[in-house]
Amino acid sequence: MTGAPPICRACDVPIEDADDAVYVGHEPSNSGPGWAIWAHRAHVDLLEPDQAATRILARVLVARALSGE
Ligand SMILES: [Zn+2]
């Protein structure tokens, strides 16, 4: 591994042990290529709210479709 260790998205603590780092996904950026999202193996479950955000977005899209536009 090169440079600084990745930061856990769930607890904002550097993940010192590479074996404990789980790649969660990629976050796009308006000003660059974006960055990878990492989390401790034990903290991956804490990132579930992303699924709630997806559900909310789906609800908005359905409501917009039903409004007859
Ligand atoms: Zn963590």
Image: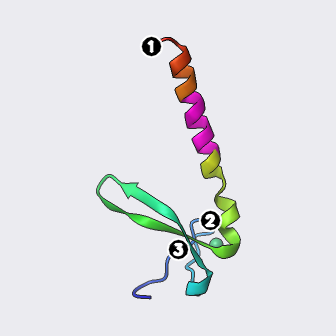
Depicted 1 relative to depicted 45: above or below: below
Report the residue at 52% width, 28% height from top.
Answer: 61
Residue 30 visible to an observer of this rendering: yes
Residue type (three-letter) at the residue carrying disc 2: Ala
Residue type (three-letter) at the residue carrying disc 1: Glu
Q: Is mark 2 within 8 Å of ligand 1?
A: yes
The residue beneath circle 3 is: 7
Residue type (three-letter) at the residue carrying disc 3: Ile
28 vs 54, left or right, is: left
* Quarter, ligand 1: bottom right
Depicted 52 relative to depicted 2: above or below: above
Report the residue at 56% width, 16% height from top.
Answer: 66
Give coordinates of residue 2: x percent, y percent. 40, 88
Report the residue at 51% width, 20% height from top.
Answer: 65
- Is mark 3 in CB contact (under 8 Å) with mark 2? no
Which of discs 2 and 1 lies nearer the camera? The answer is 1
The residue beneath circle 2 is: 10
Query: Does the magenta portion include 33?
Result: no
Q: Residues within 10 Å of mark 1 (few under 14, many from 20)?
A: few
Depicted 30 relative to depicted 35: above or below: above
Q: Which residues are magenta?
A: 52-60
The residue beneath circle 1 is: 69
Q: How is the image coloured?
A: rainbow
Q: Is mark 3 within 8 Å of ligand 1?
A: no
Q: Secondary structure at mark 2?
A: loop
Q: Secondary structure at mark 1?
A: loop
Calculate the distance from the C-alpha at mark 3 to the C-alpha at mark 1. Answer: 43 Å
Helix, strand or loop for the magenta stretch, by majority: helix
The disc at residue 42 is none
Calculate the distance from the C-alpha at mark 3 to the C-alpha at mark 2. Answer: 9 Å
